[in-house]
Image (cartoon, rainbow, N blue to C red):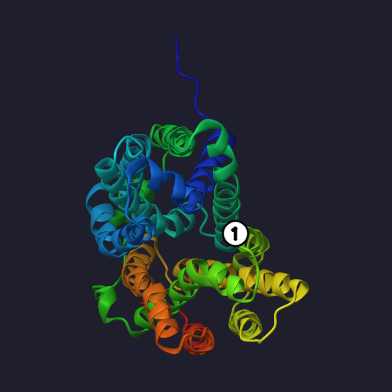
């Protein structure tokens, strides 16, 4: 009895599923937590001041773990590192619900695992689809946006029926299914050598300088870091800002959900357009305009319902367009999966560290002036610098050229 060879269609299907499912894991187990923080607090008797740390811990992990990922892939290969991250994500998602210490330790491990997947997502796209970077970046980022929005929107209603522990454990199905597909990809007899050991694929004629010495890598890091700061600051404070305009807590929460829903089309449109264009300047300018309109709208003394809804939609466009553009640029401005991993790791390490301070600084500014206007001005300045960084990146052909 002989083994039947695996068809190219089967391998292609597995590759596509891997990309889509990894996208589904980038935010899902994290975005389910904020809507049910009150439930978690009551169960574990958590102090109010500690609630925010449940989202801050993963951000710090993103910053600390991201620069290590490139070295791990050099030593072990892309797929073994991805598989290990999925195992850690599955296990930590299951046990974090049983006690307060396990919740903290679980969020720590979840942050480390997602940091690896964040860095390697564009690497996998570059390795598996070198001629379809824009389209496949759109695919996994669209998956990430849709599943994270669903997780944030439905976790509270489901928790009211099943309880919050079981609700969070149900989400473990995503990393488990992804793990099964990742193992299947590794068992393919014709698996790409790039996935097994990307270091073997580096054929540069001269020694490559470290990514930290590349000026364009620092500019791209600036773009990534500033868009992260804008996103997490808006995500943290938008409900409070809307409540200051007279909206109820429930309506403010629904508007935050609208922001996440509005982000969905940007996950498809912007990476796809970026992959088809040789220059991204028009897209980068449009992101800056989105931020100008959205943040400017929040500075108005009165914010009627129609305008508030429009502002949330525009900010949804802005935040996800900026994020997807950053992720697409990692692949578009590098030549090999190894280079992509290096740039992605550096940019996300510093970027998420910058992002972790954004909400705190915004809260400090509001406390000093007792007004959200200085916060909006601060964020508009950040959006302007982000736009400038993006235009600088667009002027150069590649990070290592």
Which residue is rendered at x = 44% and y = 69% of the image? 330
Q: Position of residue 177 (x, y in %)?
A: 47, 34
Quadrant for residue 240, please give it.
bottom right
Q: Quadrant of the C terminus?
A: bottom left
Rendered view: 27 above or below 219:
above
Which residue is rendered at x = 33% and y = 65% of the image? 345
Rendered view: 219 above or below 327:
below
Taking the image as drawn, is residue 52 in sight? yes
Tag 1's secondary structure?
helix
Foreground residue among 192 and 255? 255
Taking the image as drawn, is residue 274 in sight? no
Q: Quadrant of the N terminus?
A: top left
Q: Is residue 43 left or right of residue 250?
A: left
Identify the residue under disc 1. Answer: 138
Foreground residue among 303 and 380? 303
Q: Position of residue 349 (x, y in %)?
A: 31, 68
* Outermost residue, top side: 1
Q: Is residue 255 left or right of residue 30?
A: right
Which residue is rendered at x = 64% and y = 61% of the image? 268
Crowd tier of the residue under label 1, counting other residues whose Cα lies within 10 Å: few below 14, some 14–19, many 20 or above: many
Give the tally of numbered discs.
1
């Amino acid at each position: 009895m002989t083994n039947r060879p695996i068809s190219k269609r089967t391998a292609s299907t597995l590759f596509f599923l891997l990309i889509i499912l990894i996208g589904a894991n980038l935010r899902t187990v994290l975005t389910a937590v904020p809507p049910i923080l009150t439930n978690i607090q009551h169960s574990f008797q958590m102090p109010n001041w500690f609630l925010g740390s449940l989202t801050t811990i993963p951000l710090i992990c993103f910053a600390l773990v991201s620069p290590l990922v490139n070295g791990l892939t050099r030593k072990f290969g892309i797929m073994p590192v991805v598989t290990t991250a999925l195992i850690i994500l599955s296990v930590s998602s299951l046990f974090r619900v049983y006690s307060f210490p396990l919740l903290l330790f679980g969020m720590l491990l979840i942050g480390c695992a997602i940091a690896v997947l964040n860095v390697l997502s564009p690497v996998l796209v570059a390795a598996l689809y070198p001629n379809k970077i824009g389209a496949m970046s759109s695919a996994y980022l669209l998956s990430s946006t849709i599943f994270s929005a669903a997780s944030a929107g439905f976790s509270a209603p489901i928790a009211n029926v099943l309880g919050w522990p079981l609700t969070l454990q149900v989400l473990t199905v995503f990393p488990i299914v992804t793990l099964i597909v990742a193992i299947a990809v590794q068992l393919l007899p014709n698996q790409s050598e790039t996935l097994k050991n990307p270091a073997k694929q580096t054929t540069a004629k001269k020694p490559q300088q470290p990514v930290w010495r590349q000026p364009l890598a620092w500019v791209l890091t600036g773009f990534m870091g500033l868009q992260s700061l804008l996103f997490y600051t808006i995500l943290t404070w938008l409900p409070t800002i809307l409540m200051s305009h007279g909206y109820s807590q429930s309506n403010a929460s629904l508007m935050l959900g609208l922001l996440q829903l509005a982000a969905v089309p940007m996950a498809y449109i912007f990476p796809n357009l970026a992959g088809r264009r040789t220059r991204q300047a028009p897209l980068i300018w449009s992101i800056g305009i989105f931020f100008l309109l959205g943040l400017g709208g929040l500075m108005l003394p009165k914010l009627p319902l129609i305008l508030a809804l429009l502002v949330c939609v525009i900010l949804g466009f802005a935040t996800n367009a900026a994020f997807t553009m950053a992720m697409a640029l990692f692949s578009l401005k590098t030549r090999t999966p190894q280079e992509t991993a290096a740039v992605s790791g550096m940019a996300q390490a510093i970027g998420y560290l910058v992002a972790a301070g954004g909400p705190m600084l915004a809260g400090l500014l509001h406390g000093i002036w007792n007004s959200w206007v200085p916060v909006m001005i601060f964020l508009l300045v950040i959006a302007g610098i982000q736009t400038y960084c993006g235009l600088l990146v667009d002027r150069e052909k590649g990070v290592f050229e």
